[in-house]
Amino acid sequence: MEYVYAALLLHKLQKEVNEENVSSVVKASGVEVNPAQVKALIAALADVNIDEAIKAAPVAAAAPAAEASAAGGDEKKDKAEKKADAGKSEEQALEGLSSLFG
């Protein structure tokens, strides 16, 4: 996960997201760099528009909540069921993000 964070940090700072820069950021954080993971991340990000991926991520997490409020809040569900549903949708959104970044 630290490799993805490094790539996002570099992108935010408008620096080139490449093996050398990602390795430098990870190393600076005090974590031992695994060159194979860095190469895999850079290869996975080669065809990814990071700005578009970031914009799309919150929409995926917010969509189930918007549908629930549009449907009137479904008063029949108890609190436990609502929490379980929210956990699943958040988990699904995170799985989608991990597939984007390797």
Image: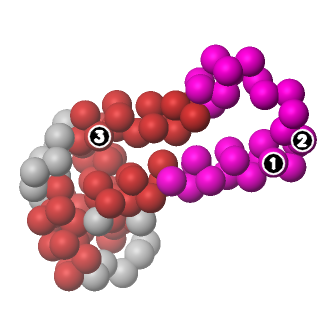
Q: Which mark is residue 78?
A: 2
What residue is disc 1 on? 81
Q: Nearer the viewer, residue 23 or 47?
A: 47
| Element carrying mark 2 | loop
Q: CA distance from mark 1 to mark 2?
A: 6 Å
Horizontally, residue 75 falls left or right of residue 95, namely: right
- Kindly identify the amino acid type of the residue bearing the numbered disc 2: Asp
- Kindly identify the amino acid type of the residue bearing the numbered disc 3: Ala
Specify few, some or many for label 3: CA neighbours under 10 Å numbering under 14, 14-19, or 20 or more. Answer: some
Q: Can you say which quadrant of the picture contains the C terminus?
A: bottom left
CB contact under 8 Å: marks 1 and 2 = yes
Counting from the top left corner in percent of width and height, residue 38 is at 22, 72
Q: CA distance from mark 3 to mark 2?
A: 34 Å
Counting from the top left corner in percent of width and height, residue 3 is at 33, 64
Magenta span: 65-92
Name which of mark 3 and mark 1 comes first in the sequence.
3
| Element carrying mark 1 | helix
- Kindly identify the amino acid type of the residue bearing the numbered disc 1: Glu
Give the residue drawn at x 67%, y 52%.
87
Q: CA distance from mark 3 to mark 1?
A: 30 Å
Give the residue drawn at x 32%, y 48%.
8
Q: Is residue 77 above or below residue 32?
A: above
Counting from the top left corner in percent of width and height, residue 2 is at 40, 65
Give the residue drawn at x 12%, y 65%.
43
Q: Nearer the viewer, mark 3 or mark 2?
A: 2
Q: Can you say which quadrant of the picture contains the N terminus?
A: bottom left
What residue is disc 3 on? 53
